[in-house]
Amino acid sequence: MMDKIDFLSLAKKLKGPWEPMEVLRIDGYHVLLALFDGEYKFHKHDGEEMFYVIKGEIEIELKNETVKLKEGEGFLLPKDTAHRSKAAKPSIVMAIERGNLRTIWVHTHTK
C-alpha cells in the first residue's frame, strides 16, 4: 500500500519563509514545500522550476511581467528566467525542480 501525502499537515512543519522542505524525490526531481511570505531576491536557475499554490496567493515577478497565482494554480518557469517570488500574506507553495538545480543571483536592474 502506498502512503498519501498530506501537504497541509507537512506545511505546519516548515521552519520559516523561504526555507523549503523536501517532501520527496521523483526520478531526479525534488518536490519541495515552502512558505512564501514577503519577497525573495531576484535569481535564476539553470533548469525549469514549477510552482503550484496550495494555500494563499503569490506573485512571480519577471523582467517584463508579473504572474499572479491563486490557490490551485501553477506556473512553469523556463530555465534561465530571472525572477523573484512574492507573497503579501503567508502562502504555501509546492515547487518541483531538478535535484542538481543551480541558482544564480542577479541584480534587480538586470532582471
Image (cartoon, rainbow, N blue to C red):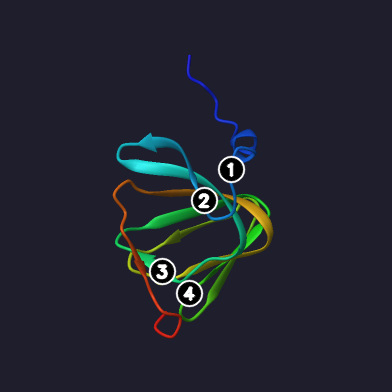
What number of labels is visible? 4
- Tell me the kind of residue under disc 3: His
Which residue is located at x 41 percent, y 69 percent? 43
Label 2, on which residue?
19
Distance from Cα at disc 2 to Cα at disc 3: 16 Å
Image depth: mark 4 or mark 3 in front: 3
Distance from Cα at disc 2 to Cα at disc 4: 21 Å
Instruction: Estimate the x, y position of residue 5 in percent, counting from the top left.
Output: 55, 30
Label 3, on which residue?
43
Which residue is located at x 37 percent, y 67 percent? 44
Question: For the residue carrying disc 1, how many other residues have a C-alpha within 10 Å: few (<14), some (14-19), or many (20+)?
Answer: some
Is disc 1 in contact with disc 2, using a CB cutoff of under 8 Å?
Answer: yes
Distance from Cα at disc 1 to Cα at disc 2: 7 Å
- Tell me the kind of residue under disc 1: Leu
Is disc 1 in contact with disc 4, using a CB cutoff of under 8 Å?
Answer: no
Instruction: Estimate the x, y position of residue 48 in percent, counting from the top left.
Output: 36, 58
Of labels 1 and 3, earlier in sequence is: 1
Q: Residue furthest bottom?
A: 109
Label 1, on which residue?
14
Distance from Cα at disc 1 to Cα at disc 4: 26 Å
Label 4, on which residue?
62
Taking depth in this image into account, of 47 and 15 the one nearest to the observer is 15
